[in-house]
Amino acid sequence: MAKTEIDSRPALDSLLAEGAPVLSEVVFQGLDLREHSQQLCGVFLKGCVFLGCLVDTELAGHLTEQGCLFYPPVPDKAYNPFRTSLYSVEELYDTFDPEAHDLTASYRTTTDFKIYSSFRIPDDPEGRLRPVLVDETLARRIHDNSISDALDEFIDHFAHRSVVAVMGGHAVARNDKLFGDIARLTRNLRRKGFLPASGGGPGLMEATNLGAFLAPYPDEALEHSLQILEKAPTFRSGGDWLAQAFQVRHLYPYRQGGESLGIPTWFYGHEPANLFASHIAKYFENSWREEGLLALAKGGILFAPGGAGTVQEIFQDACQNYYTTYGVQSPMIFYPRQYWDGPEAVFPVYPVMQKLATRGGFTPLLAICDDLTEVEGLLEAVPG
């Protein structure tokens, strides 16, 4: 029997208004149940789960008597393990002041940096993770599971094949022609109803989310934004990289129709999450995040120039297609040809992909292009 998930006040009010004497297989998540204590204490709770809920002493005793799984809120953490929604720019960068004298210091006051600091040791030359006990590890796993749950709910609002991802280098500068080209591509895709997704960080990930963010605006908005962003070309520009992005967001506030997904990680916390993903699924566990992003992109993935991380994602995606891991095979498109194929290729992986596709039965879903207009057409041609 599937469990019913209750993670909002309206859903809770609706459930309790039914007045049922028995609640069976219900998961309550991240709710303040103290004012409902008397009512819940009069209900038989069969197979119910309470995650991160606030309860009083009487209700806590009732949950114990009923044999419910109860995991109380975790105090004194920079993050909420039991959150019920994805992150937003406003939440992660809550205290950042784009006009501050010391932009880097301003960033270090934000929720995003505080969570990163609880995970890794800032400024450590070896980038070491903080040593933790099992309680902290468990809290992070619960957090990442909560993010995945919220992500599934978000994706449910979109068509089965609408999520398309762009994989590419985090170091591609904002003044690189490729950055603008990818942004124009994802702007067009968003206007056609696709949901662009990226790893949520800088470089081509930012370009992916930027194009979608500006889809509701006239074309000139993107060209103007690129001119602003070029003043701080890479994330290594420090706080100025964020400040220029905030300037774009000030000129062009988020509008409906500018949705996109960013899936970054605090594992690479020195690469800040970009400011243009409307919905941010930020994880602690990088492997969980990478596998999930590739699996979500059922509408196809464009592999643009990148380094070892992009190459790793190519083989991960090929493996998912080869074994039809998630019940569907999706397009793998490589751009441009000279980067992925031929004797002068930077990473000549395309011939290997052709052999895997032949064995795995996904040859029709494999393509390599030198024209992003052709990429757009290939993604539009995917059934569903």
Image (spheres, rainbow, N blue to C red):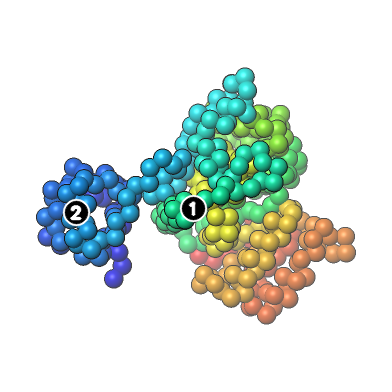
Quadrant for the N terminus, please.
bottom left
Residue drawn at the location 63% of the way across and 36% of the way down: 222
How many other residues sit within 10 Å of disc 2, few (<14), some (14-19) or many (≥20)? few
Task: Check disc 1 and report its element: helix, strand or loop.
Answer: loop
Residue drawn at the location 49% of the way across and 53% of the way down: 133
Task: Check disc 2 and report its element: helix, strand or loop.
Answer: helix
Residue 156: quarter of image = bottom left
Which amino acid type is marked by label 1? Leu
Residue 18 drawn at (x, y percent):
14, 55
Residue 317 drawn at (x, y percent):
62, 65
Instruction: Work out whether 97 lies above or below 42.
Output: above
Residue 243 drawn at (x, y percent):
61, 28
Residue situated in front as seen by the camera: 371 or 100: 100
Residue drawn at the location 19% of the way across and 62% of the way down: 66
Q: Is residue 34 left or right of residue 180?
A: left
Residue that badge 2 annotates: 61
Furthest residue to the top?
101
Q: Sequence order check: which comes first, mark 2 or mark 1? A: 2
Residue 149: quarter of image = bottom left
Residue that badge 1 annotates: 133
Residue 121: quarter of image = top right
Residue situated in front as seen by the camera: 63 or 29: 63
Can residue 383 be seen? Answer: yes
Residue 92 drawn at (x, y percent):
50, 37
Q: Nearer the viewer, mark 2 or mark 1?
A: 1
Residue situated in front as seen by the camera: 245 or 62: 62
Whole-number angstrom distance, CA of label 2 to CA of label 1: 28 Å
